Image (cartoon, coloured by chain):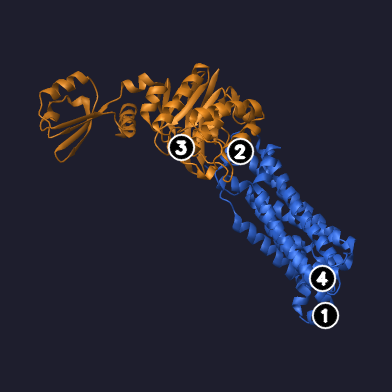
Amino acid sequence: MDMICTKDLTKFYGKTRGIEHLNLTVGEGEVFGFIGPNGAGKSTTIRTLLGLIRSTSGTASVLGRDILEEHEAILQEVGYMPSEALFYSGMRVWDVIRLSAGLRQKTAACLAEARILCGRLQLDTGRRIEELSLGNRKKVSIVCAFMHRPSLCILDEPTSGLDPLMQKEFFDLIEERSREGTTFFLSSHVLSEIRRYCSRAAIIRDGSIIACGTVEELSRTNAKRVTLHDASGLIQKLPGQNIRDVRADGPSVSFLYQGDLHLLMSLLADSPFTDLTIAEPELDEIFLHYYSEKGGDLQ
Amino acid sequence: MTIFRHEMRRGRTALLVWTAGIAAMILICIMIFPEMKEQMESFSRLFASLGAFTAAFGMDRISFGDLMGFYGIECGNILGIGGALYAALLGILALSGEERNHTAEFLLTHPVSRTHVVLWKLLAAAAQIILLNAASALAAVLSAALIGEVFAWKEFLLMHLAYLLMQLEIASICFGISAFLHRGGTGIGLGLATVFYFLGLLANLSDKADFLKYITPFGYADSADIISEGGLDPALIAIGLAVSAAAIATAFYKYRKKDIAA
């Protein structure tokens, strides 16, 4: 059974595009990454799947159930972590967790699990919501999204605000639950996260999926951003089809390199330069890459 | 039921503050009454000669000199304005407040239907308004006992019933509007309650403005009419109930399909 399946899902806010003819399939047990710049439609997709907003056209099912017809049955088995973790002010952390458990009507089991999660995340349940930092509010979100042991977790930019140790604890949790069979759908800006933890991913841009596949497939074509300082002449020696987006800034030159890295290294070894950086390209550059590949006329 | 408990807990402080405020004003008002009664003669003459104002507040129909008349005019205004503002705030923020504070996303991603959310929020608002009115009425009875007076029970109960219905109608109208808003609407709620109050005053001022009592819920919550007639106006009450029902139906219909703002 597909955990998430959308067919030509479209959402317009009046005349503004949210998503357009979005087709996406997430299988059972996957850790699925959903990447895209701000405003690409990540949250619109998630909010439509959860029934917070109604699609303009197209259909979608979650856990094999139609998102419009069986909205409550879906939410029973879905854990959701919003990108902005905001709760009722004036309440204490534990009150929020108890409210969430009460709304799920499996209070005792949820609260037992919540206690374990709070311990793991080092979340002080006696604190007031308005005193919490973004990171701590995120932890409350994690507890609320995980405590009922959902079969699908939808996480919208989950790691923003979490410190590196907590991010690790969080991804450990995802890996454990993933081994137990939970499916994860997580949106992110952070490519390294997706690359490291996700089995498959989709890239969304301007409201449509522009690439979808296993993370290996998506990153295999990835270029490197090479920046050289005081390296006159080297750029001419590199094979033209391997470099793109050359930017000169005073004495330094930067370009996207795609192809055999050994060739690059051997050329670099014979060239003069004072400084060198080889980095993963920015998210946008990967989009540029996908654009140039899928739609050459857009360049 | 979880939503109802949650709403009641969240509204507790506001309910206590508004109730304490209104009850204290009623207490102070009733404490003044014995002095008023003594000077009834001169006061009545004075108040009867204020022209338009006398009519606006209904002082041409009931006497300031007996407790029920005094209570109807003075406390009617306190409970009328205070209760109406409180009811308007409760109604207007019930659904839109969740979006303003970005908590709608939390609430509505739990397995609860929109209909369920609207129903329990509505019941919680009604319960809070009923509590405020019950406490205010109790405060009035106790205050009257303090000065050794007793209300005319029939008129007292009818008046409080009318005020309760008026507040429930205002809350329902605001609740209906709330289903359309994305960013709170405190101004709309308070404005609407105030406009209704002044329409009620205008309706008393002139026969030409009499039709206004069909528009404002203050039309049937008019102490002077209730005390002098000894009953409520069934036609006005029916209109009020119909408007309330329509507003509530609108809230259910709209909220079921509403796009929740991020």
Residue type pointed to by label 1: Gln
Residue beneath the point at 66% across and 41% down: B6
Q: Which chain is blue?
A: B
- Label 2 sits on residue: A95
- The chain letter for the residue carrying disc 3 is A
Quarter occupied by the N terminus of chain A? top right
Query: Does label 2 lie on the same chain as label 1?
Result: no
- The chain letter for the residue carrying disc 4 is B
As drawn, is B231 to the left or to the right of B258? right
Residue beneath the point at 44% across and 34% down: A207
Q: CA distance from mark 3 to mark 2?
A: 18 Å
- Label 4 sits on residue: B70
Within-10-Å neighbours for mark 4: few <14, some 14–19, many 20+: many
| Residue B253 image position (x, y, % from top left) | 68, 42
**Quarter-of-image position of residue B164:** bottom right
| Residue A169 image position (x, y, % from top left) | 45, 26
Residue type pointed to by label 4: Phe
Quarter occupied by the C terminus of chain A? top left
Q: Nearer the viewer, residue A159 or B48?
A: A159
| Residue B121 image position (x, y, % from top left) | 68, 44
SS state under label 1: loop
Q: CA distance from mark 4 to mark 2?
A: 46 Å
- Label 3 sits on residue: A135
Q: Colour of chain A?
A: orange
Tag 1 and tag 2, C-beta contact below 8 Å = no
- Label 1 sits on residue: B39
